[in-house]
Image (tube, grey):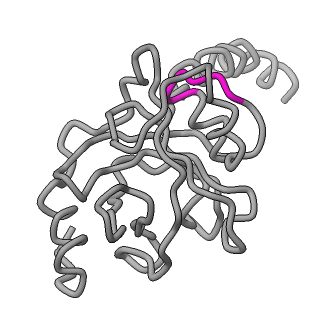
């Protein structure tokens, strides 16, 4: 039995060395939203998500219009005591975009997983992205909560290539936003 184990050892070690490199996808990430947003956008800000807006002042351009690769900063609220940051992966139309982020919906019963091309809908009265609804996997639709947003921090470099999928569901995103009771087949 020992010789059998010894003969397998080189193969097991080879797999251990190769497997992490092939599994180093941004979408395999499990953890908090801040390190994920930093890796996906290239914006090098640290600390709780709600602090990013003020920390970006003078270091990064900021504004209230989404751009692909920019980081959307959610304000600190009772539901989001640390705030939240997410990276804009696709602009669908003037009030609908897609985010790629981590630690929002539960997947396999736990939080922390990355989600790609998640629908987000601007519900602010002034169409200025100051209040949004976000797709929530557990509801299989836009969540019931409205979240205040501080704005967008614009990345200086290129965003991660995995930020958006090859075939995101733009039509589904529009239906989710404008006809939430339609529940399209996915």
In this view, which residue lies farthest toward the right?
2
- Residue range of the region highlighted in magenta in the rendering: 39-45
**96 horizontally vs 160: left or right:** left
In this view, which residue lies farthest toward the bottom?
181
**130 horizontally vs 68: left or right:** right
**154 horizontally vs 113: left or right:** left
Task: Determine the image quadrant of residue 21.
Answer: top right
Q: State whether residue 74 is above or below residue 16.
A: below
Residue at 62%, 21% (x, y): give it.
58
Q: Position of residue 42 (x, y in %)?
A: 54, 21
Q: Position of residue 98 (x, y in %)?
A: 32, 50
Task: Determine the image quadrant of residue 96.
Answer: bottom left
Residue at 41%, 69% (x, y): give it.
133
Residue at 34%, 41% (x, y): give it.
66
Q: State whether residue 147 is above or below residue 114.
A: below
Can residue 150 be found in the magenta stretch? no
Q: Position of residue 17 (x, y in %)?
A: 66, 15
In front here: 77 or 170? 77
Q: Position of residue 173 (x, y in %)?
A: 22, 62
Residue at 56%, 36% (x, y): give it.
37
Task: Determine the image quadrant of residue 70.
Answer: top left
In this view, which residue lies farthest toward the left?
171
The N terminus is located in which quarter? top right
């Amino acid at each position: 039995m020992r010789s059998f184990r010894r003969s397998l050892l080189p193969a097991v070690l080879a797999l251990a060395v190769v497997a992490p490199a092939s599994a180093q996808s941004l979408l395999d990430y499990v953890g908090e939203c801040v390190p994920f947003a930093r890796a996906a956008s290239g914006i090098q800000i640290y600390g709780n998500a709600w602090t990013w807006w003020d920390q970006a002042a003078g270091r990064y351009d900021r504004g209230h219009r989404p751009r692909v690769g920019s980081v959307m900063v959610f304000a600190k609220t009772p539901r989001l005591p640390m705030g939240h940051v997410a990276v804009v992966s696709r602009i669908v139309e003037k009030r609908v975009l897609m985010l790629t982020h981590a630690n929002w919906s539960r997947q396999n019963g736990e939080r922390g997983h990355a989600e790609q091309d998640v629908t987000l809908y601007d519900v602010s009265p002034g169409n200025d992205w100051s209040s949004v609804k976000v797709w929530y996997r557990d509801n299989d639709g836009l969540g019931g909560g409205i979240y205040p947003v501080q704005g967008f921090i614009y990345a200086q470099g290129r965003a991660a290539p995995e930020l958006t999928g090859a075939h995101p569901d733009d039509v589904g995103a529009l239906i989710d936003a404008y006809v939430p009771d339609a529940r399209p087949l996915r």
